[in-house]
Image: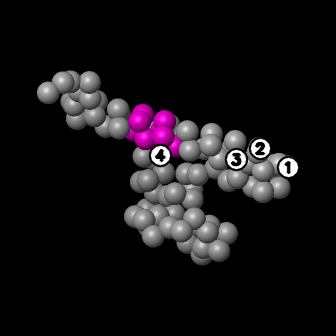
Amino acid sequence: MTPDELLSLADNPNLIAGIYNYCDRWCERCRMTSRCLLYTSTPDLDDHAYGYAEEKQNAMMRQIEDSFQLTIDLLNKIAQEQGIDLNAKG
């Protein structure tokens, strides 16, 4: 996902702003997934798609990596739009 795609998702008026702040990541039990940006923007790690615990762990680590990269990209995008040089010293 790109920063623009995430920002576009975040603009969806059907989502409840900040509901993910109360998330316990038990999405399968949550009745609010259709209104949650975190659920909407996170790829599903279906238990049946991974035969071994190691495969699922690797997929989860890739998902975390992707999340960090998206965060960095989003911060860079917003900094650029605001005219902030993130590499400036001082």
Query: In the rendered image, which quarter is residue 82 located in?
Result: top left
The earlier-in-sequence mark between 4 and 2 is 4
Image coordinates for residue 14, horizontal then vertical, percent: 48, 65
Q: Residue at x 22, y 31 (%)?
A: 84
Please state the extent of the stretch shown in magenta in the rendering: 67-74
Q: Which residue is drawn at 26% across and 29% down?
A: 86
Q: How far apart are marks 4 and 3 (CA)?
A: 24 Å
Contact flag, marks 3 and 2 (Cβ < 8 Å): yes
Q: How many marks?
A: 4
Q: Can residue 34 be seen in this view?
A: no
Three-letter residue code for mark 2: Glu
Residue furthest out toward the left: 90
Q: How far apart are marks 4 and 2 (CA)?
A: 27 Å
Q: Mark 3 points at which residue?
A: 57
Three-letter residue code for mark 1: Gly
Q: Is the magenta stretch mostly helix, strand or loop?
A: helix
Image coordinates for residue 12, horizontal then vertical, percent: 46, 57
Circle 3 sits in a helix, a strand or a loop, which is it? helix
Q: Name the residue under label 4.
A: 6
Q: Name the residue under label 2.
A: 55
Q: Name the residue under label 1.
A: 51
